Image: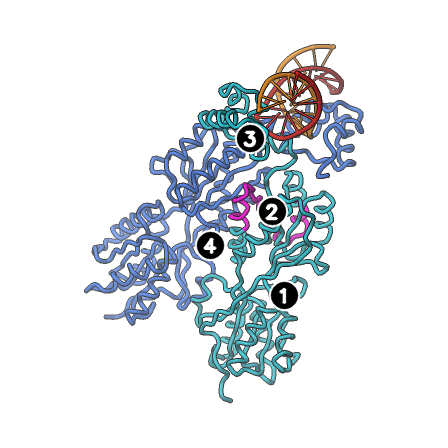
Chain colours: A cyan, B blue, C red, D orange
Amino acid sequence: MRNPVTIRDVARLAEVHPGTVSRALNEQTRGLVNADTAARVLRAADELGYRPNPIARGLKTNRSFTVGVLIPDLTNPLFPPIVRGIEDRLAQDGYTPLIVNTDNDPDRERSHVEAMLTRQVDGLIAATARLDGELLAEAAAGGTPLVLVNRSFEDSSAPAVTVDDRRGIALAVEHVTGLGHRRIAHVAGPQTVSTGHQRYEGFLAAMAAAGLEVAPEHVGFSASFTESEGARAGTEILAGPLRPTAIVAANDRLAIGCYDALARAGLTCPADVSVVGFNDMPFIERLTPPLTSIRVPQRQLGTTAAEMLLAQLTDGAPRTPGEVLLEPALVVRGSTAPPPPG
Amino acid sequence: MRNPVTIRDVARLAEVHPGTVSRALNEQTRGLVNADTAARVLRAADELGYRPNPIARGLKTNRSFTVGVLIPDLTNPLFPPIVRGIEDRLAQDGYTPLIVNTDNDPDRERSHVEAMLTRQVDGLIAATARLDGELLAEAAAGGTPLVLVNRSFEDSSAPAVTVDDRRGIALAVEHVTGLGHRRIAHVAGPQTVSTGHQRYEGFLAAMAAAGLEVAPEHVGFSASFTESEGARAGTEILAGPLRPTAIVAANDRLAIGCYDALARAGLTCPADVSVVGFNDMPFIERLTPPLTSIRVPQRQLGTTAAEMLLAQLTDGAPRTPGEVLLEPALVVRGSTAPPPPG
DNA sequence: CTGTTAGCGCATTCAT
DNA sequence: ATGAATGCGCTAACAG
């Protein structure tokens, strides 16, 4: 069968009591046992190929060494690196992630959280966009630690690790102002999700810092982070009387939509209008023109989130309701250039 | 605490014995209990918010309702859709996947398999490229069902679900021959992995079927499925005396490398040379020119694999060592055109 | 049809 | 320092 060798088999071979084997095999309690005996037990365990059964252990200790990971959609290229970061960090401490896709559907989200809690996950990491407070309440009530990644609660009632969106947008704005642009537009993301909102506010702040006006018609709000919404918002922005010379998009997919809008308007990038994206997705350096974007340390986002959760799990430290901001970086490519002379 | 309400609490409220509660709550054994009693138990369970503890159940039944999923790297855009397919299908039957990345490192692979077996996974789904027979042996010895996805063993000793690579390449070859091409080259993938090998053989077969010769210098072998290797192999192919008018690449990333090779050689696609990729990765329709490619039903690959595994898990059916081939589809875009007149 | 009993594999308390 | 005993929550075999 699977793993026929139990702690009793080891005990028999080592000629000690099962309880002693348990103590010897557990790092924590190793000290309680004679060094010689411990060595003998370890040798026996090794010889038999003994592997502790986490199920049984979990039943006793009420811990599963699993962590629930909630993401909207693994298929969105933003998430795989984050998930890998989480996974790799958790693995170091013997934890295994249970990954679920919520599709940002509140019902799916709820049922998945329920399922994970019944599976006795020791903690939760959530990257979902719209996470109603109930979920948090439920987890907190159950005493299950929760860490947010790539999003945060406004009241910062849960620890979160996010990229500094405002800083990222500032980098983008500073880049194009540095190139000489003055009329700069923003294709904003959905304002219901924290990244969309933060980046919008960051845009306003950065423009103010640069001493530039933001014409209302130079801000287009998208309903979702998709190419088609980017194209729609971009088209509206370009249709105005005083055309912007640069567009800072809240995300790469919106920026790609802007490419479409420009093409439809008979304009070229970057000769007529510069475009900056956000996230630095795979393969955007292969677009025509290669997209200038803001790189976010996605993998580090994951490792840091895992780290914060592990801190709570091992130290039993109470919630550290702080938010960790990771630094984004500007990646200059071919989609940005000085504004046209006119 | 987490889930303070146990089967005993329900029993007390419903005024029956815990054993009866267990039977009433379990679909399988529901029939063994009086309908009225069952209803009462269900009501009590609902009222108390009872959720069965899978850990305890697993300890008794020796099943964890988890499935180990081995993939090389979640960051490779090929895998997220497959994983989602697996996940969604498994979820329907109450199974949860444990996903690990092996990076095609045999050591990592081994240790991960060990860890999953220790965690009492009920089955394994492996999408890893080089999976030594030992792994299979180990799993089989432990009686753990295994299904391969996107790769297969040559001796087909394990059930596998793959895309029909030969058929896919045939579609590509037929497409370019239909456009009038005669001198067709192949940038092959690593011959050590099944997809690389199958597609190479498929190319030879399709060319033979079309009555065309394959010049040896028109086949370039890459050492890995990467852009740089594609560029290297592509450059070699283009350097020959009799330049091909079309290149069928074993994968999209190799095809992108061919774009680079063409650019370096001062040639344009598709005017001078047509290029066909394989996999239809996200965003390749945004390249210049948009890449003609072979679409593989990635998600279905995942759902089918999960289905095959579930069949073994539930029916207890012995290994069905069959291999399921899924149909690929040609997606024509701008990278293919009739050959130049010369 | 339902109550009783036992035990999955392990950690932990209490003795010794 | 180690043996003995108990129980985590649940299912399954056996009684009744």
Question: What's the residue at 27%, 59% (across, down)?
Answer: B184
* Picture coordinates of residue B59, whole percent (x, y): 60, 28
- At label 3, the amino acid type is Asn
Query: Image height check: is B51 above or below A214?
Result: above
Circles 3 and 4 in contact, beta carbons < 8 Å: no
Residues packed near mark 1 inside 10 Å, few (<14), some (14 to 19) or many (20 plus): many
Residue B271, visible in the rendered structure: no
Label 4 resides on the chain identified as: B
Q: What's the CA distance linking mark 1 and mark 4? A: 25 Å
A138 left or right, relative to B154 = right
- At label 4, the amino acid type is Pro
Q: Same chain for marks 3 and 2?
A: yes
Badge 4 element: loop
Q: Identify the disc placed on residue A164.
A: none
Q: What residue span does the magenta drawing correspond to?
A: A86-112
Q: What's the CA distance linking mark 4 and mark 2? A: 28 Å
B251 left or right, relative to A201 = left
- At label 2, the amino acid type is Leu
Which of discs 3 and 4 lies nearer the camera? The answer is 3
Mark 1 lies on residue? A196
User: For the view shown, which residue lies furthest in the left direction?
Assistant: B241
